[in-house]
Image: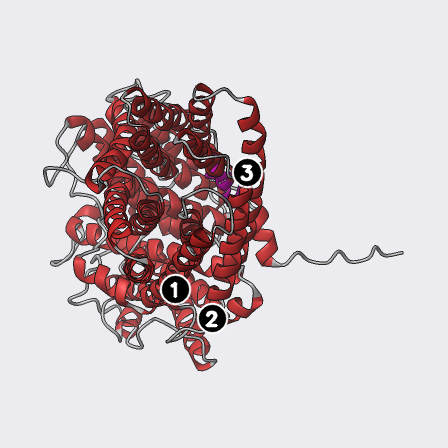
């Protein structure tokens, strides 16, 4: 007797139960405990409790952005949103003090439109847009006697204190070498570990997932190393050494990706070299003896021996060159593959389809929630407290697509707020004041880095923290009012999220796919040359191409004019951008697919486009490695290229927007 079929959980509901699984970041926990609570205590001791509350809010928002990575990168990741939050608090304070309800609503709506468009530029810009609007709502909806500039400075002081802790305190296990680069070392070591994992998975069912994990590790390391600097180059020997070790991982990653594309198992000991390099990066030491190359060069292969994978020879070659880079100490390198994100590209992202759609929705949600909150405040409908910022601040978090699908965000926010409000109501009745409230703020600040792995948990912790701050500032306990305002914001954002907007729905997904298609096109043309190269590859005519000539000799000496190390560095930079934009598109597509059916249908078919682009980029990488080794492509490479391009053309005929230019 067969068991009854279990109904499948809808994607929009399943996403609400997903949580990130990561080790507890004890260093971030310590920073959180030393940030918000002490900031509030300092304000109380100085007799400026209201400013202490704002400093604690600044530390809390900075703690939400305090993620693993390099110290220098944290300056941008924490500092830019904090500066935007201070500006929002300044504007909100003076607008709330000098404008009546209707002009104030219009100002906040305009801020929402600008912040929403800016958020489409990237993660840091999105965090800046969020803090700008949240702080503006707090400034306008939390009236105080302090002037706006003092409130902005207090907010900056709280965020700056957490940033100072991030820069000054060493993390566990960072005493090897220069502790300033412990986050960077961990990120670079993670790249070598991901390379080893991909080599081990080659030819197996987990190869695709391991390749995606390698992309994520490279993205994380690239961000960790590419933080702001006063000079245009690495200033210390430790930093130059770390940059050189990251650069040495790029050809290894390329060879490992080509092995994944080949789909054939490789010797298990092939992964030992990258593992040893990862350990050397973590300990900031030399790698010691590495496994000997297990495949001879083509010129030394015995007659009649079975053919070998060029990607495996490339892995051996890259491993030897990495060993040389490690042995040289700080070494010389040609710089990091930097993302070309200039002002023009940022403006295109903010003013493009995705930026316009998101900006309109944020403006409508933020403006409408501010208007409703002011009306309820003046009618004294939802409680005796004088602050009306909770409703618009909640709407800002709910309308952000990078926090997950809309339905998932709404469910998590509602559940987290109810839980946090109930927990605080129980604690507020038992804790002494103000010492108990300061202790509660300290504990919540320490929990934020752990709670960020799930939106509902983060909401619960932030709700308890903010309610404690409000009570510390002299307001009555307002748990019931916060629950009502949150549910109202959830309903508002659900309605606005389903309203038709000018232009085509799913603009954010299409913008990211377009960026991925452009990056794939640039990478393809760099490796294979202009259209019509396939005939040249089949005939062996490579004149004017950036491909090696000849089939023997040292690979570094076989480049024709126009090629060489600079050419390879450009190729690796283009490959990094292609895989990175594909990963960003994949994330946006997965979020869109987990929306309610009325929203998910607008991006149907985009996952097939991303898959076809990934196959094209993987094949391009395999072609690059094979051309390095033999100087020509095999029929299999050409067939796979044609299949990927034909799949994109087929999707375009079906009406799915395909971002790859026809010239490819």
Left or right for 550, reference 265? left
Magenta span: helix, strand or loop, mainly?
helix
Q: Is residue 203 visible?
A: no
Task: Please state the horizontal and vertical placement of residue 393, each as a whole percent of the image.
Answer: 40, 49
User: What number is the disc on residue 499?
Assistant: 2
Q: Identify the residue at image location x=39%, y=56%.
A: 370
Q: Is residue 578 above or below residue 141?
A: below
Location of mark 1 (residue): 364
Task: Please state the horizontal and vertical placement of residue 212, each as a whole percent of the image.
Answer: 43, 49
Rendering quarter of residue 333: top left
Of badges 2 and 3, nearer the viewer stands 3
Q: Is residue 406 above or below residue 62?
A: below
In the image, residue 457 lies in the stretch drawn in magenta: yes
Among numbered discs 1 and 3, the one appearing first in the sequence: 1
User: What number is the disc on residue 421?
Assistant: 3
In the image, residue 167 lies in the stretch drawn in magenta: no
Rendering quarter of residue 345: bottom left
């Amino acid at each position: 007797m067969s068991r009854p079929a279990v109904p499948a959980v809808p994607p929009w509901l399943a996403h609400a139960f997903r949580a990130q699984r990561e080790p507890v970041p004890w260093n971030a926990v310590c920073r959180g405990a030393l940030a918000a609570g002490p900031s509030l205590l300092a304000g109380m001791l100085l007799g400026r409790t209201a400013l202490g509350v704002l400093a604690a809010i600044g530390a809390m928002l900075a703690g939400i952005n305090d993620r693993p990575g390099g110290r220098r990168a944290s300056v941008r990741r924490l500092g830019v949103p904090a500066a935007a939050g201070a500006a929002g608090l300044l504007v909100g304070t003076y607008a709330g003090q000098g404008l009546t309800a209707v002009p104030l609503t219009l100002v906040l709506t305009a801020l929402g439109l600008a912040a929403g468009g800016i958020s489409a530029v990237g993660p840091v810009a999105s965090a800046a847009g969020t803090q700008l609007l949240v702080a503006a709502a707090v400034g306008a909806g939390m009236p105080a006697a302090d002037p706006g500039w003092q409130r902005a400075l207090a907010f900056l002081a709280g965020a700056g204190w957490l940033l100072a802790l991030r820069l000054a305190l060493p993390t566990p296990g960072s005493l090897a070498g220069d502790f300033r680069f412990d986050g960077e070392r961990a990120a670079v070591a993670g790249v070598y570990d991901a390379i080893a994992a991909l080599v081990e998975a080659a030819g197996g069912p987990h190869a695709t997932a391991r390749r995606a994990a390698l992309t994520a590790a490279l993205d994380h390391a690239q961000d960790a190393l590419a933080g702001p600097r006063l000079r245009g180059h690495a200033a210390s020997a430790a930093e130059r050494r770390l940059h050189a070790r990251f650069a040495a991982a790029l050809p290894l990653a390329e060879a490992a990706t080509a092995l994944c594309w080949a789909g054939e198992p490789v010797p298990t000991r092939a992964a030992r070299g990258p593992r040893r390099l990862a350990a050397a990066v973590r300990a900031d030491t030399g790698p010691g003896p590495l496994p000997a190359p297990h495949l001879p060069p083509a010129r030394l292969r015995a007659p009649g021996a079975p053919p070998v994978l060029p990607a495996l020879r490339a892995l051996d070659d890259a491993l030897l060159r990495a060993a040389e880079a490690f042995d040289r100490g700080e070494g010389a390198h040609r710089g990091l593959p930097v993302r070309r994100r200039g002002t023009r590209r940022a403006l295109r992202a903010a003013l493009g389809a995705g930026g316009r759609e998101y900006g309109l929705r944020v403006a409508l949600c933020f403006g409408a929630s501010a208007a409703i909150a002011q009306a309820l405040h003046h009618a004294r409908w939802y409680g005796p407290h004088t602050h009306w910022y909770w409703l618009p601040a909640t709407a800002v978090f709910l309308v952000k697509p990078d926090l997950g699908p809309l339905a998932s965000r709404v469910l998590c926010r509602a559940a987290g707020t109810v839980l946090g409000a109930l927990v605080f109501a129980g604690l507020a009745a038992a804790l002494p004041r103000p010492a108990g409230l300061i202790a509660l703020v300290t504990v919540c600040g320490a929990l934020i880095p752990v709670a960020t792995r799930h939106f509902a948990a983060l909401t619960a912790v932030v709700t308890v923290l903010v309610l404690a701050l409000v009570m510390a500032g002299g307001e009555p306990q307002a748990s019931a009012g916060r629950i009502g305002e949150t549910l109202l914001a959830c309903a508002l954002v659900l309605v606005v999220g389903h309203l038709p907007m000018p232009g085509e729905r799913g603009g954010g997904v299409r913008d990211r796919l377009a960026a991925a298609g452009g990056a794939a096109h640039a990478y393809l043309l760099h490796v294979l040359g202009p259209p019509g190269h396939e005939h040249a590859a089949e005939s062996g005519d490579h004149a004017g191409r950036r491909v090696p000539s000849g089939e023997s000799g040292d690979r570094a000496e076989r480049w024709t004019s126009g090629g060489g190390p600079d050419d390879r560095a450009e190729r690796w930079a283009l490959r990094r951008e292609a895989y990175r934009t594909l990963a960003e598109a994949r994330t946006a597509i997965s979020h869109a697919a987990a929306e309610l059916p009325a929203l998910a249908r607008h991006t149907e078919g985009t996952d097939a486009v991303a898959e076809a682009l990934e196959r094209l980029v993987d094949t391009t990488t395999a072609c690059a490695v094979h051309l390095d080794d033999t100087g020509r492509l095999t029929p299999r490479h050409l067939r796979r290229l044609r299949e990927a391009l034909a799949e994109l053309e087929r999707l375009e005929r079906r009406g799915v927007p395909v971002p790859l230019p026809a010239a490819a």
